[in-house]
Amino acid sequence: MRAIRGATCLEQDDAALMREAVSELLQAMLERNGITTDDVVSVLFTATADLVSAFPAAGARECGFSDVPLICAQEIDVAGALPRVVRVMMHVDLDWPRTDVRHVYLRGAEALRQDLPQ
């Protein structure tokens, strides 16, 4: 099993934008790693405290993660942290080395992990 990380930023706290951004992120995570939802064991989402219009998991359900266990939590509120961020940890049934996993950061969230190739 491996964990694939990802994050995306929203321009504003809006339910439709949340669904769009989460769907885009999850699809990119699947595509860049050459996997499908059948490979996904579970997904953990966190959202910064300034995102309250919708659950990130609702967007995941709409884009094909209907039978995958999902859970949402609030990211710790650190002073000066990047605002309006949804983070994802996708647990996937893979036997690849960690170095082959492609993490995905979109819509300004690339600033969170400048050490990773995009």
Image (tube, rainbow, N blue to C red):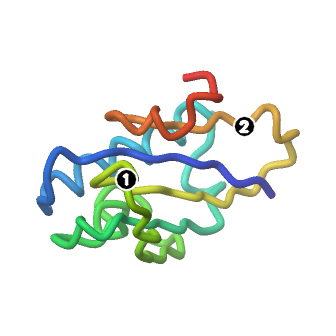
Residue 91 rendering spot, x and y as whole percentages:
67, 61
Q: Residues within 10 Å of mark 1 (few under 14, many from 20)?
A: few
Q: Residues within 10 Å of mark 2 (few under 14, many from 20)?
A: some
Earlier residue among tags 2 and 1: 1
Q: Amino acid at mark 2?
A: Val
Q: Amino acid at mark 1?
A: Gly
Residue 4 rendering spot, x and y as whole percentages:
64, 49
**Farthest residue, direction top:** 117
Residue 59 rendering spot, x and y as whole percentages:
29, 61
Residue 1 rendering spot, x and y as whole percentages:
81, 58
Nearest the viewer among 83 and 87 is 83
Q: Is residue 76 positioned above or below 17 on the image?
A: below
Examine the image and state in which quarter residue 84 appears.
Answer: bottom left
Q: Residue at x 37, y 53 (%)?
A: 80
SS for callout 1: loop
Callouts 2 and 1 close, C-beta under 8 Å: no
Q: Quadrant of the C terminus?
A: top right
**Residue that label 2 marks:** 101
Q: Is residue 4 positioned above or below 31 on the image?
A: below
Q: Residue at x 23, y 48 (%)?
A: 10
Nearest the viewer among 111 and 70 is 111
Determine the CA span between mark 2 and mark 1: 29 Å
**Residue that label 1 marks:** 80
Q: Is residue 21 positioned above or below 111 on the image?
A: below
Question: In screen coordinates, is 66 left or right of 112?
Answer: left
Which of label 2 and label 1 is nearer to you? 1
Question: In screen coordinates, is 93 left or right of 96?
Answer: left
Q: Residue at x 16, y 51 (%)?
A: 17
Q: Residue at x 52, y 34 (%)?
A: 31
